[in-house]
Image: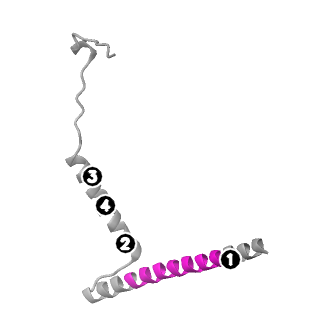
Amino acid sequence: MKDFLDSILKSVLFVILAIVGLCMAFIFMASTAIALGVMYVIARVRGQNFSAGQFWAQSRTRARQTQTDFQEKFHKRKFSTSAKDVTDVEIREIK
């Protein structure tokens, strides 16, 4: 009897968790649709065309440029020495 009640409780908790997850996914999709709608209205008021694909392409271009600028700013220069430049090597044994 106890196993039966445990399995029912686990099933109910799983169903509740699944429903909560579905609600969260729906809220995320709805908020995305609202955001795209607001961006579309703003673009129309400004007299411009708006498409989600164009917006995401511009966003990717800006992100690539930012990443390139960051990498150039913090790029470490490689200092290389050839084998001919090494004249003396000291080896110490650490105990």
Name the image quarter holding residue 22. bottom right
Drawn side of residue 54 relative to residue 46, left or right:
right
- Residues at marks 2 and 4, CA–CA distance in whole angstroms: 14 Å
What element does badge 4 sit on?
A: helix
Query: In the rendered image of this protein, does residue 69 appear above or below residue 17?
Result: above
What element does badge 3 sit on?
A: helix
Sequence order check, earlier mark of 4 and 3: 4
Q: What's the amino acid at mark 2?
A: Gln
**45 or 16, which lies in front?**
16
Q: Which residue is mark 4?
A: 63
Drawn side of residue 83 relative to residue 24, left or right:
left
What element does badge 2 sit on?
A: helix
- Mark 2 is surrounded, within 10 Å at the Cα level, by few (under 14), some (14 to 19) or many (20 or more) other residues, namely few
Q: Which residue is mark 3?
A: 68
Sequence order check, earlier mark of 1 and 4: 1
Residue 17, percent from left and from top: 58, 76
Please tell me the numbered disc located at residue 9.
Answer: 1
Q: Which residues are magenta?
A: 12-35
- Mark 1 is surrounded, within 10 Å at the Cα level, by few (under 14), some (14 to 19) or many (20 or more) other residues, namely few
Q: Which residue is mark 2?
A: 54
Please tell me the numbered disc located at residue 47.
Answer: none
Q: What's the amino acid at mark 4?
A: Ala
Mark 2 and 1 residues: CB-CB less than 8 Å, in contact? no
